[in-house]
Image (spheres, grey):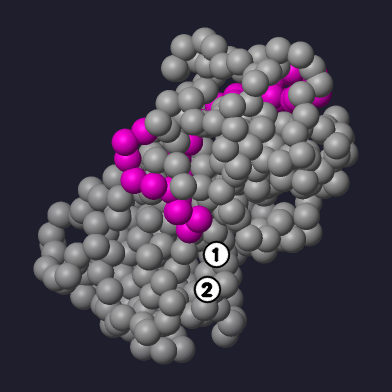
Amino acid sequence: MRLRTSSALALAAVPAIALSACGSGGATTTSSTTTTASPNASASASTASAPIIPAAKGELAGITVGGTPAKPTVEVDKAPFTTKETTAKVVTEGTGQVVNKTDMVVANALFVSGKTGKTLEDTFAANQPQQIPVNQWIPGVAKGMLGQKVGSRVLVAMAPADAAALIAQGNPQSGITADETLVAYVEIQKVGFKGEPCKVVTSKEGLPEITAADGKAATMKPTTAAAPKQATAYVLKEGTGPVVNAGQTLSSHYTGMLWTNGTKFDSSYDHGKEPTPFSIGVGQVIPAWDKCLTGQKVGSRVLVVAPPAEAYGAKAQDKIPANSTLVFVVDLVKAQ
């Protein structure tokens, strides 16, 4: 199945040709694509490995924030505006938890060219906040968010090396030049995922009876209990490896079954002996996987129940009827 694409503001971000990829597996998502201007994979990978440190603090004279909280504007008083060091100014300080480099962040952002003053990307306009791990945003935005409190509104002037140079290298058609300064106004709404979190339970009560062994697909005996309305996880076997973080590539063996009758609709073992790799926590798999597998330990075997809203919803997918609650048994083999 085709993986869901992410929007403009990821590590390879501004202004808009989305990161899209293909892969196999019953838990990948499908949706309409968004066009974004993103650097190529090699540019993204090299940037992702660079350390993220908080931006310098400054007043950013020459940039004016106006409009309303719901529809802000950013004006470059005298173009071109340039900076050699990525610098952040807290316009409004929030009262929530502090953003760390491994966090998933939900945020709105408005991007402006310091060279021309032109708006490049604006998620406030359509009220479409992005759900992206800190280290998957372009480095300039990541630096501006790091150490800030949830609820904060932050103005960030990004040095060319932290934004424009990457975009110009990967996507010369974007029209952004490698030496220009980009400016972002960011509203940090939440640390975590959109909607309800995964409910991690410690009792098997109300869950299907699972039979699972290494090297083959799991099976289940359906339960007569009502299906949960919230993404739910139960750890069948806890691993001893590191915790899985959003933005990592997680390799797993999995079996997907229908809650109603236990029918298997997919398994990694149907595709070979090697575990299936996928990006976790970045919207490339169904929400229930992003929510319930992030934070688990490598080596664990996890039962995940995905209600329709956290899976494929009202759209049928191959062997999955519309509005199906799904049951997955997932072995977390490796995360990197």
Q: CA distance from mark 2 to mark 1?
A: 6 Å
- Residue at horizontal 35%, vertical 78%? 301
Q: Position of residue 247 (x, y in %)?
A: 54, 59
Number of dots carrying numbers? 2
The residue where tag 2 is placed is 335
Q: Position of residue 76 (x, y in %)?
A: 70, 16
Q: Position of residue 9 (x, y in %)?
A: 62, 39
**Residue closest to the eye, 114 or 257:** 114
**Residue closest to the eye, 219 or 234:** 234
Left or right: residue 206 versus residue 113 is: left
Q: Taking 328 as reference, is 113 above or below it?
A: above
Figure quadrant of residue 62 = top right
The residue where tag 1 is placed is 248
Q: Which residues are magenta?
A: 94-123
Q: SS of the residue at dot 2?
A: strand
Q: Position of residue 47 (x, y in %)?
A: 71, 56
Give the residue type that dot 2 points to. Ala
**Mark closer to the chain start, 2 or 1:** 1
- Residue at horizontal 41%, vertical 89%? 214
* Quadrant of the image containing the C terminus: bottom right
Residue 162 visible, this angle: yes
Q: Is residue 118 magenta?
A: yes
* Label 2 with label 1: CB-CB less than 8 Å: yes
Give the residue type that dot 1 points to. Gln
Figure quadrant of residue 236 = bottom left
The residue sitting at the top extreme is 67
